[in-house]
Structures are given as C-alpha cells and as structure tokens.
Image: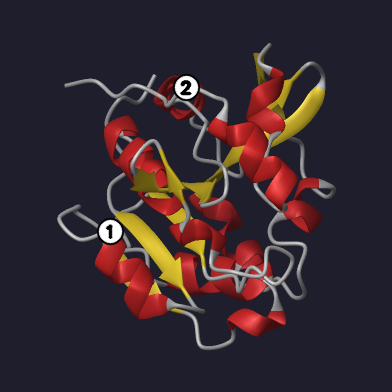
Amino acid sequence: MSPNKQIAGILLAAGGSKRMGQPKLLMKWHGAPLVRWVARMGLAAGCSPLVVVTGANASLLESCLSGLSLQFVHNPDWERGQSSSVRAGVNALPSEVDAAIILLADQPQIPVQVAEEIMSHYRQNPQDGAIWAASINGKRGNPVLFDRALFPALTSLEGDAGARSILSHYPVQLVSFDDPQLLLDVDSEADYQYLLQSPPPTFPD
C-alpha cells in the first residue's frame, strides 16, 4: 500500500453546452452551480492539485468557483472535443503527481465517497499503468483514475471521446457501486429536471 501517492484531479468544464442551449455548468442545484458541486467533491476527496479545464464561458466559470483552492487552465481548442481538454489538464499537472482522476462537471450528484474509494484502491495497488473506474450495476461509469504511466497516452488523444478510447486498449479495474444515479450526466432539460429531484451530496466538515 502507498498512502503517500499524490493524486491530482482534472475537472473537465470546457464544453459549450450546445444540447442544453445555455451554460449548463452554471445552472443551479441546491443553491450552487453544478460545476461548484463537482469542484467541492474533488477537493473533499483530497485531489491535489485540482485542475479545472475551462473553455467556453471561462470567466463565468472562474467567477462561480471563487474561494476554492483550484488551479485553472484554459483550453483554447475546446471546440475540438473533450480529448483536447484532457490533454490540457494532464499537461498542467506538476511532475510529482502519481495519478489523476478525471471528474466531469455535469455529474454533480456523485458522492465524495465514490472518488475516495477509487483513489483508495489505487493507493492499495499502485501499479504502473493502472486504471481504476466506477462500475454501476456492471456498467463502467465515472470518475476514472489513470496512473502516471498513461499520461503520454492521454496527451495524444484526439476527438470528442475524451479518455474513453484509452479504456478499450488497457485493462480497467472496477470499483462496484449499486447506485444507478451515478450514471446520470446532465445533457438535457429532462436530465436537469430529474437532478433537481435529488438530494445534494454531503461533504465532510
């Protein structure tokens, strides 16, 4: 076990929300923008540093995340797809980072315990090239953690698949959860309305 492994967080928040028709990450849920819930979760889980990748609406996002201990990196190529944001986030990580967990800004309902458990599994089995991901009722979900040995692969990604294309080329170790809500991402007004019926996650004091 390696409890001292440093795990960074990469919060992908660069998208233009074309399907939603408005900046969805700024939409409110229990009094705070969706993206702020995810940032608070990453910090509560112990991500160090937590890098927020912005693109569209960058200044608005930075403003609504004020007061949190975050590192911002702007992705000028955000319209080229999620892979460009993954690249920007990985390239911004300091050299001492051992792994990175990728968080999606449109999944504010994911509890801090999910990220903590994935990070804990990695620290207990810190293999070079390891990938750990949440599994919900047998379906792979988010977040996903990548060992540093895979950073070159992450920075060579292209297109809008994000890190998904890597997952088909390397063995992925799964941490099982039984909450189907973990699979929700807010892509439509119906998703948002469904989210509004959900209680917010709680964070340790």
Residue that protrudes farthest toward the top in the picture: 178
Residue on which disc 2 sits: 199
Give the color scheme: rainbow, by chain, secondary structure or one colour. secondary structure
Identified by mark 2, the residue type is Pro
Residue 127 has which mark? none
Mark 1 lies on a secondary structure that is: loop
Residue 131 visible to the viewer: no
Q: Nearer the viewer, residue 104 or 138?
A: 104
Tell me which corner region of the image, top left, top right, bottom left or bottom right, holds residue 160: bottom right
Q: Earlier in the sequence, mark 1 or mark 2?
A: 1
Rendered residue at 29%/61% (across/down): 64
Label 1 crowd bin: few (<14), some (14–19), many (20+), radius 10 Å: many
Q: Nearer the viewer, residue 79 or 63?
A: 63
Q: How many marks?
A: 2
Task: Name the spot of residue 90 as percent of width and height, x first.
Answer: 48, 65
Task: Name the spot of residue 4 as percent of width and height, x first.
Answer: 27, 32
Please state if 74 lies on the left or on the right of 164 as rendered: left
Tell me which corner region of the image, top left, top right, bottom left or bottom right, holds residue 142: top right
Residue on which disc 1 sits: 65
Mark 2 lies on a secondary structure that is: loop
Task: Name the spot of residue 176 as percent of width and height, x first.
Answer: 67, 15
Q: Nearer the viewer, mark 1 or mark 2?
A: 2
Labels 1 & 2 near each other (Cβ < 8 A): no
